[in-house]
Amino acid sequence: MIIRKIETFILHVPVTRNRIADSTHTLTHWGAPGVIIETDNGLRGYGYTGTHAHLATDRLIRDCIANVYAPLLEGEDARGVLYLWQKLHRNPPVQWVGRAGITHLALSAVDIALWDLKAKQAGQPLWQLLGGAAAEPLEAYNTDGGWLNWSLAELVDDCRRQVEEEGYRGVKIKVGREHAAEDLARIEAVRNAIGSRVKLMVDANGRFDLPAAMRLGRHLSEYDVTWFEEPIWYDDLPGHTRLAASIDTPIALGEQLYTLDHFRDFITAGAVHFVQPDAVRLAGVTEWWQVADLALAHRLPVVAHIGDMVQVHVHLSMAHRACRLLEYIPWLRDCFEEPATVRDGHFLPPQAPGASTTLRADALPRFAVD
């Protein structure tokens, strides 16, 4: 499987609710800069990362793939995924300009495409290649109904619909209003609507300072909140450690941590209880698996970030034994030949060989930009 051709792309896909907001961001589109790697036997591997659809920064990711990583890949055997990951990750010029951020997101797309190729060559879905079993159910929780720009009535009605009509046993809502009383009123209303047996998570997207997070956090156990996600600034390790020790509700984080070393520091400090690695923030499948093994070694559950926006997370979560739960957001469903699908509150096991990242024939004509 000698690498002969490397193509890049940028997709900007409308979000399903037209306009959504959390405490720090407002979005109308989701971005997916990515790569297609073709080998001499005709197989094509697809990988991509996830962004807020900002064309200038998406171009930086695309150009990093095309101009920095592609020359290092051409002529290599695509089966040597771990060797190639090390070659790209430890490349001195790349390390000099950044060991996280743009170079990491670019590497994630490449690594995912290589694992897609490896599974296609084996004729297996990636979860099976990695040793997973279809008999192990993977529960879904829904995030695409808890947006902060929604009215209280819209929020409650949609969370109730997800549970009663769509079968979800877990929902997540955004917090970060100006006054804690507003957030608590929304949490209470949703808890009353979905009942006591459904998981309820809250996500602040790094909005609060430590005192504000403590004020809100000490009330969350009254509503049996499963976790408090990204309560304060993403890199504040001492703050998360103090918060985790001061409230009863567990802390979840990880989507803004870019390396195995970042996760090591948060885990060993006791600053996180639900570990949320993202294969497109980390350097792909390879580093995601390292983080999941680290969490397992500390007996912490792994709940990967953004299940449907990152097709590969379904495969990883089905294969790794630290995972039993995965987020669902359906923004990119129309892009893939085999989109992540939930039925009766659980993800269906993908059946096609690969990582479920193969783009539909109409995805590039419909959504490609630049």
Image: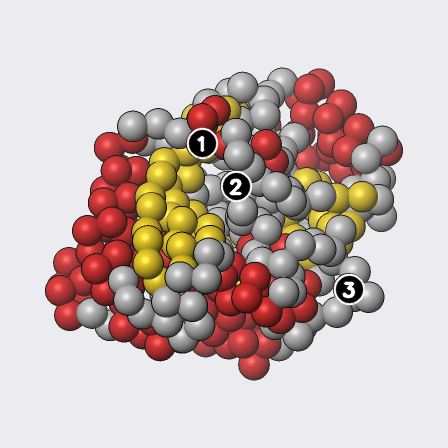
Mark before the other along the chain sequence, 1 or 2: 2
Disc 1, disc 2: CB below 8 Å?
yes
| Number of callouts | 3
The residue that appears at 18% across and 62% down in the rendered structure is 94
Which mark lies nearer to you, 2 or 3?
Answer: 2
Residue 148 in the figure: left or right of residue 57 = right
Res. 91 image quadrant: bottom left
Give the class, few, some or many, for how many residues have Cα within 10 Å of label 2's Cα (few <14, many ≥20). some
| Kind of residue sitting beneath label 2 | Leu
Per the image, the residue denoted by label 1 is: 364
Residue at image position (28%, 44%) is: 62
Whether label 3 touches label 1, CB < 8 Å = no
Marks 3 and 1, the one that precedes in the sequence: 3
Q: Amino acid at mark 1?
A: Leu
How dense is the environment of label 3, judged by Cα within 10 Å: few (below 14), some, or many (20 and up)? some
Q: Nearer the viewer, residue 131 or 28?
A: 131
* Quarter that holds the N terminus: bottom left
In this view, which residue lies farthest toward the front? 41
Q: Would you place residue 56 above or below residue 309 in this image?
A: above
- Residue situated in front as seen by the camera: 74 or 47: 74
Question: What is the C-alpha distance between the residues marked 3 and 1?
Answer: 31 Å
**Location of residue 336 in the rendering, given as x and y in whole percent from the top left corner:** 58, 40
Could you tell me residue 113's position as x and y percent? 44, 57
- Residue 214's tag is none
* Residue 359 image label: 2
Q: Amino acid at mark 3?
A: Ala
State the mark number for residue 134: 3
